[in-house]
Image: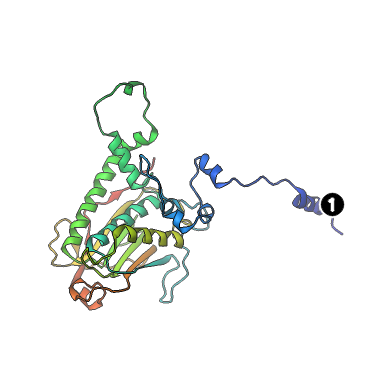
Amino acid sequence: MAGPGRQERAGEARGGFRAPLPTPCARAAAGCRPVLSDLSRLSAADLLQTEPVEAPTVTPELAAGRGGSSAAAAAFHGPQGPAGRAPGCRSVSVAFPGPVTQQGCCHFACELLKHVLYQRHQLPLPYEQLAYFYRRALPRQPQDGDAIKKKPHSQDLGSSRKCQQLLMELEGVFRHLEAMFNLTLVPRVLILLGGNAMSPKELYEINLEGISVSNAEESLQTPSCVRKLFHSLFLADVFSELQAVPVMGTIVMVQGHRDCGIDWFRPKLNYKVPTRGRKLTVNLSCGGNSSTNPSTQQGVTSAWDNYIWFQAPVTVKGFHE
């Protein structure tokens, strides 16, 4: 026979009032970020569609999963790999149905760098939005009514000195990455967050060894490949269970031919990829009819003997609002 206390608790469990959970629309109206349970109700086609607006918007692929607050989930939740991979390591593989251009490979690396910086709280807004508000904050000819209008917070954010410095550094990295991809095949790119190049807190590797490079006429369209890449990252849900981190420095490492002639990146002849820290590897490859020319095929391991690591001479410093 149950005691009075247990009977009361059972009655509360059966008939007690439960407040209804807020709907996704209600959360959106309250200014909250979407959560994975909201986005899982959408179809894949909906996830890849965005409507044109005046300022760039956060797409579901970018917004989903940022800033997981679970105290118990402080690391990537991938299982330990068969080769003794640390529990904090995880990988996502994306196979494109055909070859891509060398410029497309550079675009993948730049977009992933922007994505990682936003998801790991080094940017208060996605890169495109931040750049948009920075351009809006540039000095312009005063117009009627400007004196009585108050700047929105996002415009003040774009005019901050930290924002200007960050955008200037990232633009430099993107510009020299493009030059690097034009000079040599790039089998791998590293994005290192926190710590230093030898011992970062988080490591993001972009593996391009399985990519088949061809000319623009025979290659896939880069935008469709970018959508496939981010859709795969969204489905893998690699960021939602990571804790928020403070502002950290970001180092970019690029692997290229030792005689490529790049003068901005600094060669690191004896650099070894760190094995400690949390790691996410994004493996990109091409299927279908790929190029058979050895000079344009990024899949032969023996071809990488003359490739070394190059380090960007700047450490990109993130900032919070």
Residue 45 on image: x %, y %: 44, 57
Residue at the (31%, 57%) spot, across then down: 223
Residue at the (48%, 46%) spot, across then down: 33
Q: Is residue 288 left or right of residue 215?
A: right
Q: Is residue 241 left or right of residue 168?
A: right
SS state under label 1: helix
Q: Nearer the viewer, residue 66 or 245?
A: 66
Q: Nearer the viewer, residue 29 or 44?
A: 44
The image quadrant where one finds the C terminus is top left
Which residue lies most toward the bottom here? 302
Q: Is residue 270 visible?
A: yes
Q: Nearer the viewer, residue 183 or 201?
A: 183
Residue at the (75%, 52%) spot, across then down: 13
Residue at the (49%, 48%) spot, across then down: 34
Q: What residue is disc 1 on?
A: 4
Residue 8 on image: x %, y %: 80, 50
Residue 147 on image: x %, y %: 33, 21
Question: How has the structure been colored for display?
Answer: rainbow
Residue 275 on image: x %, y %: 35, 67
Which residue lies most toward the right here? 1
Q: Quadrant of residue 100?
A: bottom left
Question: In the rendered image of this protein, does residue 226 appear above or below residue 16?
Answer: below
Identify residue type, mark 1.
Answer: Pro
Q: Quadrant of residue 230?
A: bottom left
The image quadrant where one finds the N terminus is bottom right
